[in-house]
Amino acid sequence: MELIPLAKAIAIGVGAIGPAIGIGMIGSKAMEAIGRNPEAAGKVLVPMLIASAFAEAIAIYALVIAFSL
């Protein structure tokens, strides 16, 4: 029984769920903040993009781990 394809699937699946939830929460909170204070849109946008990039990096790490198995 081959366990390597199963390990790859689990690595990608679990590695994608966390960043997906994180990016969703980042986006929703940013939109909520902009909705409450539209003048702060410029101040909210850059930290939102940086946090999204960090969450995406975790998904890329999971992809790299899956390909290295």
Image (tube, rainbow, N blue to C red):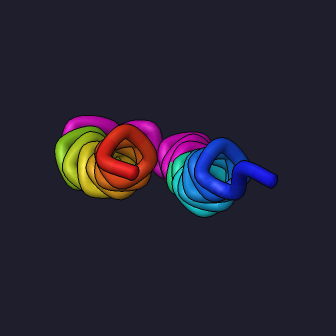
Q: In which quarter of the image is residue 64?
A: top left
Residue 65 in sight here? yes
* Residue displayed at 66% across by 60% down: 14
Task: Tell me which secondary structure the magenta stretch mostly adopts.
Answer: helix
Q: At which x and y percent is residue 25?
A: 63, 57
Q: How many marks?
A: 0
Q: Quadrant of residue 22?
A: bottom right
| Span colored in magenta | 27-42
Q: Quadrant of residue 67?
A: top left
Instruction: Decide which of 39, 69 is in the foreground and name it.
Output: 69
Residue 29 in sight here? no
Q: At which x and y percent is residue 38?
A: 44, 38
Instruction: Decide which of 62, 20 is in the foreground and name it.
Output: 62
Instruction: Decide which of 45, 18 is in the foreground and name it.
Output: 18
Q: In this rendering, is residue 17 above or below 41?
A: below
Using residue 3 as the reference point, say whether residue 12 is left or right of it.
left
* Residue displayed at 22% across by 37% down: 42
